[in-house]
Amino acid sequence: MNARHLEIIHLVNERKRLTVNELAVHTGVSEVTIRSDLSYLEQQEHLKRVHGGAISIQTDDVNERLTIHFDVKQRLVARAADLVLPGETVLIEGGSANALLAQALAQRGDVSIITPSAYIAHSLKNDHVDVILLGGVYQSQSESLVGPLTKLCIEHINFSTAFIGVDGFHQDSGFTSRNMMRADVVHTILKKKQRNIILTDASKFGKICPATLGKIDDFATVITNQGIPESDIAWFKKKNIELILV
């Protein structure tokens, strides 16, 4: 990776979305070169190419994150849905994979869904499913509800399984999140000591984000796709955490 690649990553993460033309002007190279750079950086999972430009994969915008590794997320969701029994009440915390899971479960119509995600609740408005949207302070970009009221709601509601979204995993830090207020909500979910399941694609492995999500033994199961490091597979086995690879 050269200095121009690093500059492109910085610009895209800072602006969230840039066109090929804008990147060419910023870096002083041709649009042909930028297109080649974007293809390489997408392969290395530093950004996501879109028509005419690129978007940051660090965005909290759920609609944009849904397009990243979409086929993989569909496979993860199919496996995760198999773990949910008819009549079960599940808490779905947030994130793009969890949003797809909520839609899959809603189409089944045999579960109740609790969520602090306004995005998830809105996406289910036409489905015949019981949805409980938790209260709290609204974060507009992630469309999540956070803060003391959200935590209070969780403390006074019952569920049997929680699906948690993450932004990173490393053996040194465990599961982590970019959003500290959402991480605080996750801590309250984990205190309920129900079946907690991580649903994430393999691109999150090896990344460390600012906020740690509980202790590793707070989680019963991790659902991800093939391609995570063999050392992580051995680590989960040693920690007695069920690892489902799809």
Image (cartoon, rainbow, N blue to C red):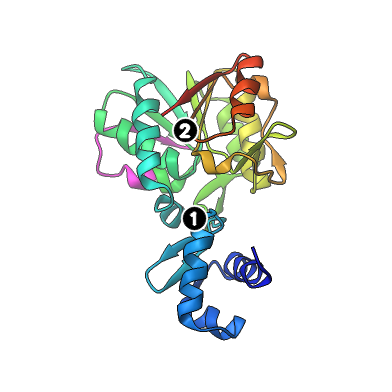
246 relative position to 148: left or right: left
Specify the segment rendered in magenta. 121-136
Q: Position of residue 196 (x, y in %)?
A: 54, 23
Q: Horizontal placement of 107 versus 134: left or right?
A: left
- Out of 231 and 73, give the one closest to the viewer: 231
Q: In which quarter of the view is residue 187 placed? A: top right
Of the pair 142 and 64, the residue shown nearer to us = 64
Q: Secondary structure at mark 1?
A: helix
Identify which residue, 138 or 66, lies in the foreground.
66
Disc 2 from disc 1: Cα separation: 16 Å
Q: Which residue is mark 1?
A: 43
Considering depth in this image, is 135 or 231 the residue closer to the camera? 231
**Residue underneath mark 2:** 226
* SS under mark 2: loop
Labels 2 and 1: the sequence-earlier one: 1
Residue depicted at 65% across the width and 22% down the height? 235
Q: Is residue 83 magenta?
A: no
Quick one: label 1, few (<14), some, or many (20+) residues within 10 Å?
few
Type of residue at label 1? Gln
Type of residue at label 2?
Gln
